[in-house]
Image (cartoon, grey):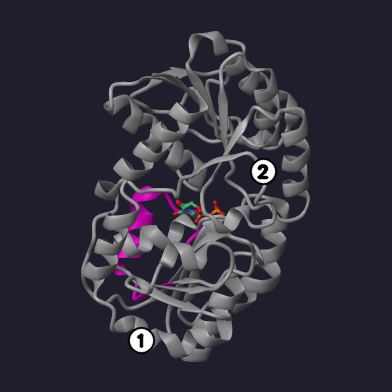
């Protein structure tokens, strides 16, 4: 198949720090190329891929994130060449999805964000003006607010397991990895660590003004006494942090569409304690790699139980469900359907 993968333009593929979508796009484009497909990746010029790379921007314009004109230039560069492809798989946001309606090639759009509230309503309108654009969810729970959209497949994310080696031992600190905001719950992780008197390492993205405000108000005042913020971490540091943690806390309070951090942690042999929101029960399964609690106040009591989980069991759980081959195969099937 001649496949175009349209990545968001804002971060390189793969990303140097934060960037869940960019890791998935990287893994998918390489996996499809390995399967012998003719793959073209539309991403920023500082990306690395086995596919042919097409870039409007030489360097990822992260400082312009969310601006419509740069995004339009990037998206249109792909749709402009639609007649060269059998299928286009768009991973950008609403703009890419709606413009899929004018593409000469079939378009499947992967929804990476939650569908509650305004984003879901916009997808509903897109469905009306661009009914031929097929949608791919990354968890079944993500579809819940709008189960009747034009869903063509559900393709849970995956991990390149070689990049997340397992270190089977009991670490000595709690870990929070994510973005600095209420939804991801860094402040809950802090509360748990303070209650138990355990060391906590926090790593995460804090680039946007709202993230800085949240951090200054809810996290920073509690730093010290074993609670430390390491900033945004790159892949190597992230893996080391995950491997050596005792438990990764995922105390979210939002409609998490997937939650890569959970499978990254389990792949490294570290159990996860997560709150039951969004896709958490789907991703965590029946508890081989961690514990799902109803609310964050139950986390302290769950730590001792998490200590009992075999790190190799965590690893196996991810290998069986979130291997790249499964994800690439699922996408191939969705493309065939769309064509
Ligand atoms: N991440 C990272 N460094 C950081 C913070 C996060 O590499 O300092 C990565 C994290 O490991 C994961 C991604 O960014 O791969 C976040 O994806 P996830 O699905 O967990 O959350 P999102 O932010 O997309 O809601």
Q: Which dot, 1 or 2, sits closer to the camera?
A: 2
Q: Residue 149 shows which numbered tag?
A: 2
- How far across and down, in percent of the image, does residue 181 sit? 65, 63
Question: Which range is magenta?
Answer: 229-248
**323 magenta-colored:** no
The quadrant of the rendering that contains the N terminus is: top left
Mark sitting earlier along the chain (1/2): 2
Above or below, 27 relative to 264: above
Relative to 45, 244 lies left or right: left
Q: Residues within 10 Å of mark 1 (few under 14, many from 20)?
A: few
For image coordinates 60% across by 36% down, the residue present is 62
Decide if ligand 1 comes within 8 Å of the CB at mark 1.
no
Q: Is residue 216 above or below residue 60?
A: below
- Give coordinates of residue 322: x percent, y percent: 35, 52
The answer to whether the residue bearing label 2 lies less than 8 angstroms from the nearest atom of ligand 1 is no
Residue 305: assigned label: 1
In-image side of 257 versus 17 (left or right): right
What secondary structure is found at the residue carrying circle 2?
Answer: loop
């Amino acid at each position: 198949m001649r496949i175009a993968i349209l990545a968001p333009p804002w971060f390189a593929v793969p990303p140097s720090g934060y960037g869940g979508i960019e890791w998935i796009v990287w893994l998918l484009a390489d996996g499809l190329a390995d399967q012998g497909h003719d793959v073209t990746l539309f991403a920023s010029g500082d990306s690395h891929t086995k596919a042919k790379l097409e870039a409007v921007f030489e360097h990822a314009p992260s400082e312009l994130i969310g601006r419509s004109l740069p995004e339009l230039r990037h998206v249109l560069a792909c749709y402009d060449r639609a007649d060269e492809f059998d299928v286009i798989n768009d991973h950008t946001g609403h703009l890419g999805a709606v413009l899929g309606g004018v593409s000469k090639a079939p378009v499947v759009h992967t929804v990476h964000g939650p569908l509650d509230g305004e984003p879901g309503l916009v997808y509903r309108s897109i469905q009306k003006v661009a009914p031929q654009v097929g949608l791919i969810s990354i968890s079944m729970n993500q579809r819940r607010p709008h189960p009747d959209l034009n869903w063509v497949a559900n393709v849970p994310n995956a991990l390149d397991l070689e990049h997340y080696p397992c270190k089977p031992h009991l670490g000595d600190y709690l870990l929070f990895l994510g973005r600095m905001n209420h939804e991801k719950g860094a402040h809950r992780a802090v509360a748990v660590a303070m209650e138990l008197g355990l060391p906590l390492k926090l790593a995460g993205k804090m680039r946007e003004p709202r993230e800085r405000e949240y951090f200054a108000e809810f996290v920073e005042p509690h730093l010290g006494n074993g609670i430390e913020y390491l900033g945004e971490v790159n892949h190597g540091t992230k893996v080391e942090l995950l491997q050596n943690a005792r438990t990764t806390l995922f105390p979210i309070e939002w409609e998490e569409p997937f939650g890569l951090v959970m499978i990254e942690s389990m792949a490294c042999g570290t159990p996860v304690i997560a709150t039951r929101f969004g896709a958490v029960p789907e991703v965590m399964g029946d508890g081989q790699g961690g514990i799902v609690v109803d609310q964050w106040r139950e986390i302290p009591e769950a730590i001792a139980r998490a200590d009992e989980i075999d790190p190799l069991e965590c690893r196996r759980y991810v290998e069986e469900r979130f291997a790249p081959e499964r994800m690439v195969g699922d996408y191939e099937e969705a493309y065939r359907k769309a064509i």
